Image: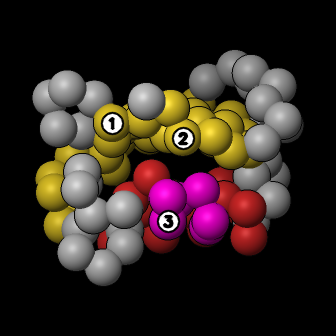
Amino acid sequence: MPARHLLITGLVQGVCFRAEAQAKAKDLHLVGWARNNSDGTLEMHIEGTAPALQKFEQWCQRGPNGARVEEVLAKDEPEDYQKSFTIQM
């Protein structure tokens, strides 16, 4: 299954981005994780079908209400065999 690593910059913390991403991932049948980084960025690992990954990345360009996404850096990475989408602390 294809997997992607995302690093999202901008106003992406304190706006429920991780929770909304988890809900969106569930809707698209994606698995992986999301975590806030100490530098203010949001990092995610997502796995699923190529079309679902593309839709998720498009959603990340906007994010939830209140977010101001500056950039989404995405790269392919090896599958990690996640079973669900989790929010990491």
Residue 74 at x, y = what percent? 44, 40
Q: Quadrant of residue 23?
A: bottom right
| Magenta stretch: includes residue 81 | no
Q: Quadrant of the N terminus?
A: top right
- Toward which corner of the image does residue 17 lie, by quadrant? bottom left
Q: Which residue is mark 3?
A: 20
Q: Give the labeled residue for mark 2.
A: 87
Q: Height in image: 26 above or below 43?
A: below
Q: For the residue labelled by badge 2, is the local secondary structure a helix, a strand or a loop?
A: strand
Determine whether 81 is above or below 32 in the image. Answer: above
Q: Which residue has dot 1 on it?
A: 36
Please tell me whether the stretch drawn in magenta is mainly helix, strand or loop. Answer: helix
**Callout 2, which amino acid?**
Ile
**Residues in magenta, as a range:** 19-24
Can residue 88 be spotted in the picture? yes
Residue drawn at 58 percent across, 62 percent down = 56
* Residue found at x 73% / y 62%: 26
- Spatial CA distance of label 3 from label 2 is 11 Å
Asked whether, in this view, residue 32 is left or right of residue 15, the answer is right
Q: Which of pointers 3 and 2 lies earlier in the amino acid sequence?
A: 3
Dot 3 alpha-carbon crowd within 10 angstroms: few under 14, some 14 to 19, many 20 or more: some
For badge 1, the amino acid type reads Asn
The residue closer to the viewer here, 22 or 56, is: 22
The front one of 65 and 55 is: 65
**Circle 1 Cα neighbour tier, 10 Å, few/some/many (<14 / 14–19 / ≥20):** many
Residue 23 falls within the magenta-colored stretch? yes
Residue 39: percent from the left, percent from the top?
Answer: 15, 29
Q: How far apart, in angstroms, are the residues tagged by discs 3 and 1?
A: 13 Å
Q: How many numbered discs?
A: 3
- The secondary element bearing badge 3 is classed as helix
